[in-house]
Image (cartoon, rainbow, N blue to C red):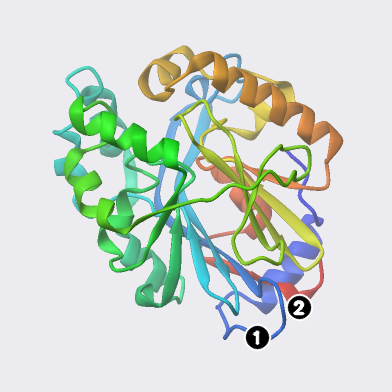
């Protein structure tokens, strides 16, 4: 497994203290980091990466909720409540796989339901920050109006192209969310080896970096909570093993979901190198449930900044 910033034993102590979210503090920086789970399932391990060794890939669609005195942000919003019907809007080539994925889930919650289950009032979010705009990441934003949704301009152009030629994002979801889309304004300020970045709160607690390939402007998000740092990489890689061993996507899921295969391969190589340079930073692929468990123990859970780490 990719190393987390703290030992599992230390994490267990922290989690025992903060299984239920508490009020945000007035201290600067993020006060809590929470695992909000939208769905769970089991997928053949070979789909996780080309050359993956696990027989089964424990899969999740999850959101990372960062509670912050200057505004709470939900990184990835899961599925729309209308997700099943949305599958019928995808291209005929993509629909069977999408329906197989959603049909194989053990359970699925809407974004408001999952947030409430994690002890968070959906209407209190300041922002939604999808790592990219696919239905299992931006979909739930449709049910979280009027919260603004932060995406890079190139990702908005991708959505416009999807409207003209429906492929893997449902038009009804794009139309529901479009009025609330707000641009991420990347600056030329480097961050941990990335050439540009966007600091959401201006205090380094949530820093967005470009991670293109899976979609034209997929992003990765660094979250700093006290002394620990997490790097949410969206779908740049599906499982931690891909980062540890530099494994490319499986052919099947690459064909299904990657906008630019070579760019996605480059992103994986970059992340593998990043992991070697920064083994203390917990890298979290959006769909690898074991990586989320290593960080939080179980869902829904919150980690507090003032609990050590
Ligand atoms: Zn995904």
Residue 109 seen by the camera: no
Seen from the viewer's position, the closer of residues 194 and 256 is 194
Label 1 crowd bin: few (<14), some (14–19), many (20+), radius 10 Å: some
Identify the residue position indicated by label 1 in the image: 25
Q: Nearer the viewer, mark 1 or mark 2?
A: 1
Task: Give how far apart the Cα atoms at labels 1 and 2 are.
Answer: 10 Å
Location of the C terminus by quadrant is: bottom right
Q: Secondary structure at mark 1?
A: loop
Q: State the residue position of label 2.
A: 306
Image x and y of residue 102, in percent: 28, 38
248 shown above or below 241: above
Residue furthest to the front in view is 188
Image quarter of residue 168: top left
**Image quadrant for the N terminus?**
top right
Q: Residue at x 50, y 37 (%)?
A: 218
* Residue 46 % position (x, y): 51, 19
Q: In the figure, 204 relative to 131: above or below? A: below
SS for callout 2: helix
Residue at 27 percent across and 53 percent down: it is: 177
Left or right of residue 140: residue 197: right
Measured from the top left, where is residue 270 in percent x and y? 71, 26
Is the CB atom of the residue marked by disc 1 within 8 angstroms of ligand 1's nearest atom?
A: no
Q: Nearer the viewer, residue 217 or 73?
A: 217
Q: Are marks 1 and 2 in contact (CB under 8 Å)?
A: yes
């Amino acid at each position: 497994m990719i190393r987390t910033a703290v030992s599992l034993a230390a994490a267990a102590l922290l989690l025992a203290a903060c299984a239920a979210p508490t009020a945000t503090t007035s201290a600067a920086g993020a006060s809590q980091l929470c695992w909000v789970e939208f769905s769970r399932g089991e997928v053949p391990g070979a789909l996780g990466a080309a050359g993956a060794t696990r027989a089964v890939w424990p899969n999740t669609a999850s959101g990372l909720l960062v509670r912050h005195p200057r505004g709470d942000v939900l990184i990835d919003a899961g599925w729309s409540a209308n997700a099943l019907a949305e599958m019928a809007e995808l291209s005929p080539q993509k629909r069977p796989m999408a329906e197989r994925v959603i049909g194989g889930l053990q359970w699925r919650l809407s974004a408001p339901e999952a947030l409430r289950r994690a002890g968070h009032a959906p209407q209190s979010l300041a922002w939604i920050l999808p790592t990219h705009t696919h239905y299992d990441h931006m979909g739930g934003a449709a049910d979280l109006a009027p919260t603004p949704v932060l995406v890079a301009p190139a990702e908005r152009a991708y959505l416009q192209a999807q409207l003209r030629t429906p492929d893997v994002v449902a038009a009804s979801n794009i139309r529901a969310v479009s009025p609330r889309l707000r641009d991420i304004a990347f600056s030329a300020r480097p961050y941990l080896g990335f050439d540009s970045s966007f600091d959401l709160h201006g205090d380094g607690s949530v820093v967005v970096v470009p991670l293109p390939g899976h979609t034209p402007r997929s992003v990765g998000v660094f979250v700093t909570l006290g002394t620990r740092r997490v790097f949410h990489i969206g779908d740049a890689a599906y499982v931690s093993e891909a980062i540890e061993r530099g494994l490319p996507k499986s052919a099947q899921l690459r064909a299904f979901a990657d906008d630019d295969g070579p760019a996605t391969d480059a992103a994986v190589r970059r992340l593998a190198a990043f992991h070697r340079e920064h083994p203390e930073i917990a890298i979290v692929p959006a769909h690898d449930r074991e990586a989320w468990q290593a960080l939080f123990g179980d869902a829904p859970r919150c980690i507090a900044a003032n609990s050590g780490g």
